[in-house]
Amino acid sequence: MAAEIHLIGIGLRGPGLSNWPTAKEILIHGGLDPLMPTPSGRAALLPPTERRRATEVTRLALDVAEEAVGCHDPSDIPALFTSSGGEVNIVHEIFLTLVGPDRRLSPTQFHNSVHNAAAGYWSIASGSRMPTDSLCAYDDSLGSGLLEGLLRLQEQHQRILVVAYDLPAPYPISLYRSIPSGFAVGFLLSSDPKDTPMASLDWSYEAEPPAVSPLNDPGLETLRTSNPAARALPLLIAIARKETQTLRLGVGMQGALCLKIQPCY
Amino acid sequence: MSNALGLGRAAFKEALLSHRSGLRPCDIDGVDFITAIGRVDGIEQHPLPDAFKAYEGRNNRLAHLALMQDGFMPRVDELRRSLGAHRMGVLLGTSTSGILETEQAYTRRDPVSGALPADFRYRETQNTFATAHFIREILELRGPALTVSTACSSSAKIFANAARWLEADLCDAVIVGGVDSLCLTTLFGFHSLELLSKNPSKPCAIDRDGISIGEAAGFAILTHHHREEGSLAVLGAGESSDAHHMSSPHPEGLGAAIAMRACLNAAQIDSNDVDFILLHGTATRTNDIAEDRGILKVLGEAKNAASIKGHIGHTLGAAGIMNALTACLALEGQFTPGTLHTQTVDPLIRSHVALEPAIHAPTSIILSNAFGFGGSNACLLLGRDQHGR
């Protein structure tokens, strides 16, 4: 294994969770109400015209990206976005338009509907011409995304931003894909020893699906199992509690990413 | 592979050599404007095997039709027996996935509750991961599976992901594929952007006026390099972002140039050694000129190049692998394709755009481009595996 990998930034939005510093309290002590609203996306880094065009899910993804990047220059950091449903609301609007009396779509509606809309808007917001990824592995989108990010670090890049996000699908798709509340998380990973770490990570890929133990707090556990991006909660809790832990996250609905987390004090 | 020119390698190669197009006037129900499409015949008559009924849909059928060609599935079986199912992964590039099935389900909503019909399968059709999952199941593989969905660069970028999987020893072999199928969302969407031509597309032509959408599925098996000297090889991959606009390329091709340069660097190949360029070449006014400006920055002028978008249309999420597989056929057969429907090349384009195929063209290294919405750029170099590279 090459250089040690450090987690150097976190961004977080979820039901009653408005950013990483204030969410730590709930992650440490529990008591999450999964029915609380998830904060609306702001996408403050986007130019105003693009901000107006971007969808809610894209703005939410950009907010956790911005929080995770913190004071680092985003323009030389490759970014990876991973989501099960992607642009669920705009896709629903398009389906409604296509069965309506006037089938014409708007150009903005169409370019916002691609799975990589968040990745594209982030590239515009950050000015980064580095590679951007846009991935999907159904319920394992987070684990698969983190694994791809770790592989990019191993390849050549010193830092990588990994963002996982999912919003509830609107009715009637919600009948077939129930995600009750929105969640988005960003991780800034680094192999640069000069970066100040929150935790160091050691990882391996395992070919068998992970056995995941439920979280003690019922609210956090409901959120973890109901939103694919919230599969990150055990990792976030370990870091918030400064606990050394070995965790497993599903990868590609088949294997597992085994993460050894060593918080740095 | 499967595309508008037929099923399998031989049909595609014959059409490239005889310079024949698979595009036709749009005959999709519900489309009320004139355009040309690259439609694959036989999908409607090709139900999935009984055990995979839950995955029924145009995208998965198209994928299955392609997997059934040219001894691909028996070759996968053979590799699975020697490597083990868990050592073989699946990487899929798609932009549409199975949204056609959801479009159709919305026409059958319950008039009172608005619910979708009971036979709707979100996970197995619409979800962006659906076709990757289907492919892994039908090939009986147990390695990782992943969908890359970066619009029209999707199935070029998967080659870079596959290289990382092999390098990190996640797998011994990766099935890479690109699958995109015709649906109203993309037809009406590109129409709204005024990017659809009324006629079969004319890449790089002085009078080019937009794209023709096609559907296609293509697959390849990637293994560790140096396995077989002289076999076809991905020599390098390069990726970048435009940081410019969601649906228009950087006008000077800046992002495209970064991807091409990164690709040459990764492969450690001099730009002079590139024999031919398979252009992204979608035939819109802005795309073709931006790509050419990117090429000019990195590879210089008068490079031999062609676009196959006049043959099979712009196959969106499958476009990257369609170009890569065209490069493989060209390297094997020592020919280069032409550019269909184009009479006069735009004088602003500085590459040497081949209008006719070259039947005997010594070719050892081909550069292949794919660019997508969101300013997502990917470039591949294909050639022969050589000792020491």
Image (cartoon, rainbow, N blue to C red):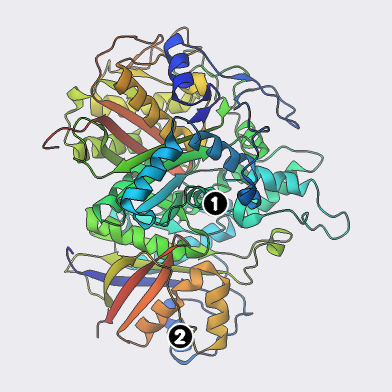
Identified at 47% across, 92% down, the residue is A29
Q: How many marks?
A: 2
Query: Residue A175: x percent and y percent?
Result: 72, 64
Write down the residue under mark 1: B128
Amino acid at circle 1: Thr
* B205 horizontally vs B329: left or right: right
Residue B324 vertical placement versus A250 (above, below): above
Query: Residue B145: x percent and y percent?
Result: 43, 54
Write down the residue under mark 2: A27
Identified at 56% across, 87% down, the residue is A218
Residue A35 vertical placement versus A135 (above, below): below
Identified at 34% across, 27% down, the residue is B328
Amino acid at circle 2: Leu
Query: Is residue A129 shown to the viewer in this render?
Result: no
* Callouts 1 and 2 in the same chain: no
Camera-side residue of B292 and B46? B46
The chain identifier of the residue carrying mark 1 reads B
Query: In whole angstroms, how far apart are the C-alphas of marks 1 and 2?
Result: 31 Å
Query: Is residue B291 shown to the viewer in this render?
Result: yes
Identified at 62% across, 34% down, the residue is B182
Q: Secondary structure at mark 2?
A: helix
Camera-side residue of A46 and A181? A181
The chain identifier of the residue carrying mark 2 reads A
